Image (cartoon, helix red, strand yellow):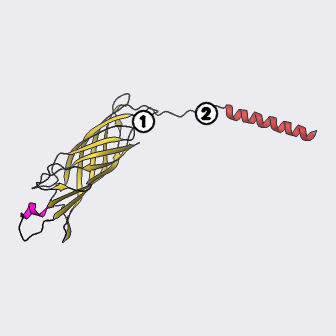
Amino acid sequence: MRLFLKIVILFTVGHVFSQNTTSEPLPSAKIDSLYREDQFYASLSYNLIQNRPDGFKQFSFSPGITFGILRDFPISKNRHWAIAPGIGYSYNNIKQFINSEEIVGATENTTSENIRTIITTHSIDFPLEIRWRNSTQNSHSFWRIYTGLKTSYVFNSKLKLESTTESSKESISDEINRWQYGAYISVGFNTWNPYIYYGLNPIFKEGSKMSNFNVGFIFYIL
């Protein structure tokens, strides 16, 4: 009999305890009315190149890679409009080739070959964006249109030449414009955002008027 009473008491206490535990309301998540959006970014793009020299053609994939941080400053009450200055890093790799006949002309004593040129640049970026998005306080999936200007300081650049007979690599930092300027725009929803960057000044100080023109995707992280 005592054993039976102990089991009944234990069951009753456990049942009451479980009811108290499950009946308590869960604390509601705090909503931040002063939220900011998209303060880290990274992009991957293909560098199509503007104003290529005569006879030069691109080969393989010429990548452009950027990443950095932006400070979001909402300027409208609903926080749909904002400006965002930032700092970042960019890497560009431009692959082109030209046939030797384009340089010296066709002769009986020379063999035609493709000479590859690979230009690599490393830059510190200073973007400034004007932003529109239809985000809300409790949703991070929204449409966005971000556009702006970017100033880049090229701190390292190299040129690599490759042919069937030899290969060489040298610094070209003195031949290029250290300060590069461009405009860009990104439009998209949630994660995937098509991205276009249009260089406004030439890569080189003299001679070639070649400039960057990148098309790809940019990803934003809160």
Which label number is shown at residue 53? Answer: none
Which residue lies under the disc numbered 2?
A: 26
Find out whether residue 21 is within the magenta segment: no
Picture coordinates of residue 178, whole percent (x, y): 19, 55
SS of the residue under disc 2: loop
Task: From the image, give the main secondary structure of the stretch colored magenta.
Answer: helix
Question: Mark 1: which amino acid?
Answer: Ser
Picture coordinates of residue 124, whole percent (x, y): 27, 53
Cα separation, mark 1 vs mark 2, equals: 25 Å
Chain part drawn in magenta: 99-106
SS of the residue under disc 1: loop
Front-most of residues 222 and 102? 102
Total residue callouts: 2
Which label number is shown at residue 141? Answer: 1
Mark 1 or mark 2, which is nearer to you? 1
Front-most of residues 57 and 136? 57
Question: Mark 2: which amino acid?
Answer: Leu
Asked whether the residues under the numbered discs 1 and 2 touch, taking CB atoms below 8 Å apart as contact, a structural biologist would say: no
